[in-house]
Image: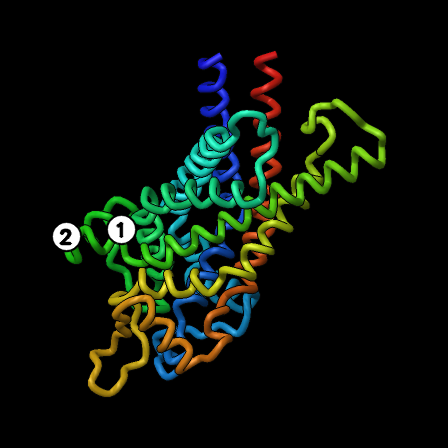
């Protein structure tokens, strides 16, 4: 029995890793666009060295024209590594937590315990992967647009950051990153609740009883559930992503020079980012890049959950 449980946990991890890999490979250019929108605080318009994109389509066109395919897939290596590791670990820790909370006669966890399980998994994943996301952001902003080309790849970026800025630089943005644990918690809780609602509806409509839930739901259901849960999480937590991105690239991206400054926007901490963003950009500043974020992450979540659920079905069929 213990061997079966252990195998099930590793199958969840493998399915999550495959899902994360598939999602990032499909939609990486939109992630590049989102990152560039997030870190552009609107004060760079006076600088001829920084492109100001009108919208997502214009950004994709400009990057492709100015930087080619390499620009659209900037930071691809750490993105693949980060997403594969993150999704794999997330599903592993998440399902471990759920099993731990399902004690006694508990058959179905409450929304609160689903959220606690997801938050626990998200915190552990955040601590493990923050350095990968810092490297990814630096590489995504390494372009002619910012007159930055100091890194030659994933390993070089990692080594250069540690050498020039210290190990602590790899954990820049960890504060809002941990707050973003709420994103995953909301997404997975919403997914579980939407999934239960869909199951109840289908069982009632087709008068299905005592049937494996995975036989009732199909890929279209999983795609819709993944999309709905992602929209819910994005709308509630997106400002944290902007704050984290700006902290992670601080001392790296050149913005408009201000009186008494050295031409580089420097944020002291998360609260300073909040105050500066509110002061110069207002509420829209906290939602920069949300269009490209939605265009990338909604289909990405759909793809990830479809792949995850179907890979699990495959593993289960191999065992029976």
Which residue is nearer to you in this view: 129 or 58?
Answer: 129
* Location of the C terminus (image quadrant): top right
Q: Which mark is residue 163?
A: 2
Q: Is residue 301 toward the left or the right of residue 251 in the image?
A: right
Residue plotted at (79% across, 36% down): 202
Which numbered dot is residue 246? Answer: none
Q: Residues within 10 Å of mark 1 (few under 14, many from 20)?
A: few
User: Depth check: 181 or 171 in front?
Assistant: 181
Question: Residue 72 location in percent, x, y?
Answer: 46, 56
Residue at left offset 43%, top offset 55%: 180
* Residue at the far front in the pictured view: 104
SS at circle 1: loop
- Tell me the mark number nearer the camera, choosing from 1 and 2: 2
Relative to 88, residue 78 above or below: below
Task: Classify 10 Å Cα crowding around label 2: few (below 14), some (14-19), many (20 and above).
Answer: few
Chain-order first, disc 1 or disc 2? 1
Decide if residue 143 is on the left or right side of residue 152: right
Find out whether the residues at labels 1 and 2 contact each other: C-beta distance under 8 Å: no
- Type of colouring: rainbow
- Above or below for 210 versus 19: above
Q: Nearer the viewer, residue 152 or 240?
A: 240
Q: Where's residue 184, x and y in %?
A: 49, 48
Which residue is disc 1 drawn over?
152
Picture coordinates of residue 189, whole percent (x, y): 56, 45
Q: Residue at x 54, y 58 (%)?
A: 234
Residue drawn 33% across and 70% down? 271
209 sits left or right of 273 in the view: right
**Where is residue 144, by image quadrant?**
bottom left
Cα–Cα gap, marks 1 and 2: 15 Å
- Is 207 left, or right, of 111 in this rendering? right
Q: Residue furthest bottom?
A: 259
Height in image: 142 above or below 120?
A: below
């Amino acid at each position: 029995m213990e061997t079966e449980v252990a195998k099930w946990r590793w199958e969840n991890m493998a399915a999550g890793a495959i899902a994360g890999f598939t999602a990032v490979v499909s939609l990486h250019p939109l992630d590049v666009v989102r990152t560039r929108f997030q870190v552009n605080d609107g004060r760079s318009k006076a600088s001829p060295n920084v492109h100001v994109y009108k919208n997502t389509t214009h950004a994709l066109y400009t990057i492709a024209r100015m930087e080619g395919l390499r620009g659209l897939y900037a930071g691809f290596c750490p993105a693949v590594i980060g997403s594969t590791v993150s999704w794999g670990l997330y599903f592993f820790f998440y399902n471990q937590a759920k099993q731990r909370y399902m004690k006694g006669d508990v058959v179905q966890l409450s929304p609160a315990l689903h959220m606690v399980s997801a938050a626990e998994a998200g915190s552990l994943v955040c601590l493990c992967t923050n350095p990968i996301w810092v490297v990814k952001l630096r590489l995504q902003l390494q372009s002619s647009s910012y007159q930055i080309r100091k890194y030659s790849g994933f390993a070089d970026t990692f080594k250069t950051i540690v050498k020039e800025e210290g190990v602590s630089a790899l954990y820049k943005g960890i504060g809002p990153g941990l707050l973003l644990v709420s994103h995953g918690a909301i997404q997975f809780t919403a997914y579980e609740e939407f999934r239960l609602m869909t199951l109840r509806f289908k069982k009632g409509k087709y008068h299905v009883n005592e049937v494996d839930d995975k036989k009732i739901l199909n890929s279209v259901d999983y795609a819709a559930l993944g999309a709905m849960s992602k929209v819910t999480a994005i709308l509630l937590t997106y400002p944290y992503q902007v704050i984290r991105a700006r902290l992670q690239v601080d001392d790296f991206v050149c913005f408009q020079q201000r009186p008494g400054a050295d031409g580089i926007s420097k944020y002291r901490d998360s609260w300073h980012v909040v105050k500066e963003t509110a002061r110069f950009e207002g509420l829209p500043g906290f939602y920069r890049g949300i269009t490209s974020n939605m265009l990338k992450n909604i289909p990405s979540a759909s793809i990830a959950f479809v792949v995850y659920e179907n890979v699990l079905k495959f593993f289960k069929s191999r065992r029976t």
